[in-house]
Image (spheres, helix red, strand yellow):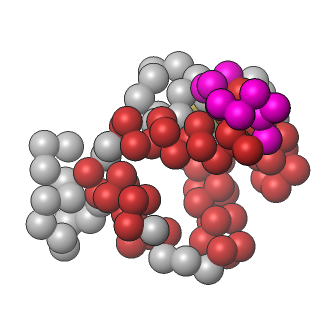
Amino acid sequence: DKILAYMMKKSDNQSAENIFRSLTSEDNPEGVSSIAWAIASLEEVIDITLGLKWGKDYILVDGCGLSEYNLMTPAHLVKAISYLYQKYDFKILDYFANTKEKGTLKEK
């Protein structure tokens, strides 16, 4: 929880990449998750939970969102965040940068 909060508030891309890979590393028979493995694993989850198809509704090429080749409409992003908000009932919105908290929008 603290790692996720730090990653989101500071926009820490390295942490995001590592978290993204670690989410699927247990499913990999080799024990180490590459970006390609993580994306392939996530494709199935996104299809089942949100009904979105990779290549048609969105494209992910990294785990931090830094690449200009990551593509998703605002509506699909809201759908994903809404799913997390409703399913896991945690304060996901508190993780996002905001104007009320000092330092969360610095140089953004």
Pinpoint residue 71: horizontal percent, then vertical percent: 58, 29
What residue lies at 53% left-to-right and 19% top-to-bottom?
69
Residue nearest the viewer, comparing 31 with 55: 31
| Residue 40 on the magenta span | no
Q: Is residue 43 left or right of residue 96?
A: right
Residue 85 is situated, as x and y percent measured from the top left of the image, at 60, 71
Q: Nearer the viewer, residue 48 or 4?
A: 4
On the rendered image, what quadrant is the N terminus found in?
Answer: bottom left
Q: Position of residue 26 (x, y in %)?
A: 73, 44
Q: Residue at x 41, y 29 (%)?
A: 66
| Residue 43 position by quadrant | top right
In the picture as drawn, the residue positioned furthest to the front comes out as: 30
Name the side, left or right, on which 35 lies relative to 68: right
Specify the principal SS of the magenta part: loop
The residues colored magenta run: 27-36
Tell me which residue sits at (84%, 40%) in the image.
44
Location of the C terminus (image quadrant): top left
Would residue 55 appear left or right of 73 to someone viewing this image? right
Image quadrant where residue 2 sits = bottom left
Do we see residue 102 in this rendering? yes
Q: Is residue 53 above or below residue 76?
A: above
Q: Is residue 17 above or below residue 88?
A: above
Give me the residue at 64% from left, 65% from top: 84
